[in-house]
Amino acid sequence: MSGVRIIFQGDRLWLSSAPALPEVEAELRLRLPEGHLALKVAEDHPLPEGVEALSLREAFPRMDPEDWARAGRAYQWLEWAAAHRFCGTCATALEPCEGPEAGHGRRCPACGRTVFPSNAMAIIVLIQRGEGPDRDLALARSPHFKPGVYSAIAGFTEPGESLEQAVHREVAEELGIRVHRLRYFGSQPWPFPNGLMVAFVADHLDGDLRPDPGEIEDARWFRLDALPQLPSALSIARWMLDAAVAEGAVGRLPGA
């Protein structure tokens, strides 16, 4: 992928077999803060010779991780720009903010409303119980997962809610149990389409698994040496699970 020009067609990234992507007419052009040019072409734009259009998930195994992360960042900027062309208060076309302190926001010339790029905040939590090498992990599968795949519990935060409160609420709603001793694991920008995933490890406090049938297809406790099929290596869920297996005990995960 070109390190300068990043092209999307809908939610699909252009990958070229040539050293650089071709010049194209774009519906939307953005110069990203780090200087790269992000472009969005029309859905009916013909694919140039030697170019493939892949989803970010499909592109992940084909790309250098740094290039993939850069493409995900470009996609989030393009999505934000496309969704913020007009003022939400008076419907006037927004204009770029001006001045050295303007950042990358847009301002309404009619009513003065200013908007800035933001992420949808989400949490993901890996729940453990037991001690030492016999620890179990609570994993669940959504009906939207590939067959056989289980993962950690995740969900979006709600307005006025802290990350920790979101963890407790999501676990109670989706699994019917309570957790305690939350430890921060890490975070990951999540370009599907514009999230920031914040990961925690937590200990089981009480309750039996009672998955919410509207959200969860199945949920079980798994031993570290008998884990099911796991999510893709591109996700922080997999990073947590790989760390748990590598350490041999969830209690020694980074952040524990």
Image: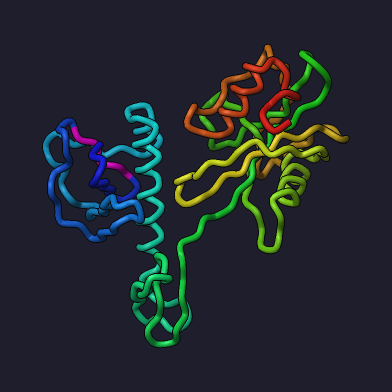
Res 177 → quadrant: top right
Q: Is residue 66 above or below residue 27?
A: above
In the rendering, at what x and y percent does residue 129 appear? 81, 26
Figure colour scheme: rainbow
Q: Is residue 100 above or below residue 150?
A: below
Relative depth, front residue between 256 and 68: 256
Q: Position of residue 3 (x, y in %)?
A: 26, 41
221 and 240: which is toward the camera = 240
Q: Which corner quadrant of the image does residue 143 belong to?
A: top right
In the rendered view, would you say 39 is above or below 96? above
Residue 132 on the magenta segment: no
In the image, the segment drawn in magenta is 12-16
Q: Quadrant of the C terminus?
A: top right
- At 48% from the left and 81% from the top, the residue drawn is 89
Magenta highlight: main SS: strand
Is residue 213 toward the left or the right of residue 55 in the image?
A: right
Residue sitting farthest toward the bottom: 110
The picture places residue 137, in percent across and down from the top left corner, at 72, 25
Farthest-out residue, right: 206
Q: Residue at x 62, y 16 (%)?
A: 246
Up/down of 34 relative to 185, above or below = below
Instruction: Please report the residue visible at 45 percent of the width from the left and 50 percent of the height from the top.
Output: 193
Instruction: Pick whichever, 226 or 23, lies toward us.
Output: 23
Q: Quadrant of residue 15?
A: top left
